[in-house]
Amino acid sequence: MNSNIPSSQRQRSSSQKYSPNEWQDYFDESINLNISGTNDVFRIYKSDPVKPDGPLFLMHHGAGSSGLSFGWVAKHIKELTQGEYGVIAIDCRGHGATKTEDELDFSLERMSTDLIAIIRDIVKDNQDIVLVGHRYRLTYTGQ
């Protein structure tokens, strides 16, 4: 049978091809961040930059994903910058391992408030960040 799929790929079962990877495959650390004044706990995956105040890529996923959707990119950013850039990926409200009081509030105001609280807690004063986000049919990068 003629196939464009390499033989090594044809040998795998469906469960092997589509099993999720572990955060340790891409990030140095996984933490639960308690947001002050709330019962909200956000799962954060991170790889710190070599220098404590080095720049960070801050990854914000879209609906139906998790911070781990940025795993491959995070691993390659770390490799390509030789660790000079750090990467932080968030499991947003209602996704992944994050637990919040209102799991279904996906309003722009709520999501913005969540992101600001996380930035205030994790990002150091005067530390540069590059915000990278995605959602269905949209990719955003900002600095």
Image (spheres, grey):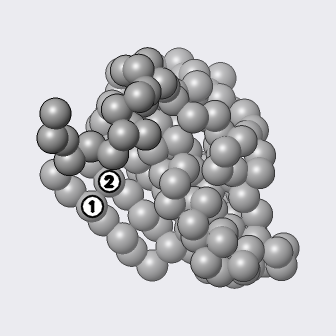
Among the 4 quarters of the image, the one containing residue 9:
top left
Q: Nearer the viewer, residue 47 or 73?
A: 73
Extreme-front residue of the structure:
1
Q: Helix or strand or loop: what does disc 2 sit on?
A: strand
Work out whether 41 lies above or below 15. Answer: below
Name the residue: 31% across, 36% down: 63
Q: Nearest the camera: 5 or 22?
A: 5
Observer able to see residue 35: no
- Point 20% across, 47% down: residue: 4
Q: Which amino acid, by three-letter code, is at mark 1?
A: Thr
Residue at mark 1: 139
Quarter containing the C terminus: bottom left
| Nearest to N terminus: mark 1 or mark 2 | 2
**At which x and y percent is residue 42?**
62, 34
- The vertical placement of 103 against 20, above or below, is above
Horizontal side of 120 relative to 68 (left or right) equals: right
Q: Quadrant of residue 116?
A: bottom right
Name the mark on residue 134: 2
> For the residue marked with disc 2, what is the amino acid?
His
Q: Is residue 67 left or right of residue 134?
A: right
> Rounded to the nearest whole Å, what is the CA distance between mark 1 and mark 2?
4 Å
Please state the horizontal and vertical placement of residue 74, each as a whole percent of the image.
Answer: 57, 60
Is the residue under label 2 in contact with that under label 1 (CB below 8 Å)?
yes
Q: Badge 1: how crowded within 10 Å, few (<14), some, or many (20+)?
A: few
Q: Position of residue 20 (x, y in %)?
A: 51, 29
Above or below, 120 relative to 131 = above
Please count the marks in the image. Answer: 2
Q: Crowdedness of circle 2 by 10 Å Cα count: few (<14), some, many (20+)?
A: some
Relative to 104, 31 lies left or right: right
Quadrant assignment for the N terminus: top left
Identify which residue is drawn at 65% across, 29% down.
41
